[in-house]
Amino acid sequence: MEAWEFGSAVRRWRDRVSPDAVGVPHGSRRRAAGLRREELAALAGISVDYVTRLEQGRATAPSEQVVEALARALRLDDGERTQLFRLAGRAAPGSGVVSARIPPSVQRLLDRFSGIPVVVYDAAWNLVIANAPYDALMGPTSALRGNERNAVWRNLFGPASRARQTPQEHDELVGRLVADLRGTMGRYPDDHGLRRLVAELRAASPRFEELWGTAAEAPRAEQSRLKIIDHPSVGAITVDCDTLVVAQDDLRIMVYTAEPGSADAERLQLAIVLGTQSLAG
């Protein structure tokens, strides 16, 4: 990879992106029309220092996950995304692997949810992106590293979720996730990252190993989508959690809402305001 070419492309595309287009608040005295480095870093879920080193050509060989995150944050079209992967010395992921790509049509849908907690997972239940209201409700996702960003791993090993669950509810959730992951393995048998994740889960968790052996059975239907979130500042918030599956792109979009006009809706809005202020600070 010619590091300076990669960095130059990132800078050029960063200058092109309007803050309004990606939901970044900005003041009237803003001098730059495009995104600042810290804004791109926040959108991509990487450090400002790493973005700086990439743009200056001092960091080489960014991972596939970093390139995908930058392409998503920069709102690149398919051709530009392929070019960014090429400049990174990598081939854009093909159809035979689990993709973290969010296509423009899905991104437009997510933009409509700008004030609602939303998180997106890929087919292997790796966290792709979470918006600021989600982080405000459920805790910052930027602190999650490695396998912690996988929902199956996280539900087996932590860190703990703010969603309140009985032991039975937790066991049923893990069972559904493992069954879904087994289906994903069947669709992407040659995905090395997916195979590595499953191997690590099988080695680390006897419970996962047990479930993996029976995951071909149909998972039990979820009885309720209601969740109680124990927020550290606001207290208990009862929300609906709806999972939307984008079949063509094999993504899972989880949306958290509360009954309009209810006390839970007020608490949810307060949690979002408090959390986004804290994250911005």
Image: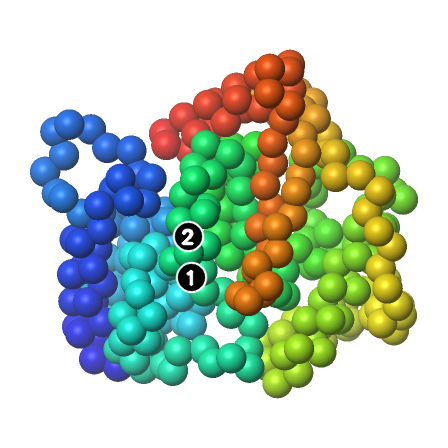
Q: Above or below — where is 13 with respect to 92?
A: above
- Residue closer to the observer: 273 or 255: 255
Q: Above or below — where is 177 with respect to 34?
A: below
- Three-letter residue code for mark 1: Pro
**Which residue occupies the extreme bottom position in the image?**
190
Give the residue displayed 18% in from the left and 47% down from the top.
Answer: 34
Residue 146: percent from the left, percent from the top?
56, 61
User: Number of marks in the image?
Assistant: 2
Tell me the crowding category of disc 1: few under 14, some 14 to 19, or many 20 or more residues within 10 angstroms, Cα based: some
Image quarter for residue 179?
bottom right
Image quarter for residue 210?
bottom right
Question: Circle 2 is placed at which residue position?
Answer: 107
Q: Quadrant of the N terminus?
A: bottom left
Tell me the crowding category of disc 2: few under 14, some 14 to 19, or many 20 or more residues within 10 angstroms, Cα based: some
The Cα–Cα distance between marks 2 and 1, rounded to whole angstroms, is 6 Å
Element under disc 2:
helix
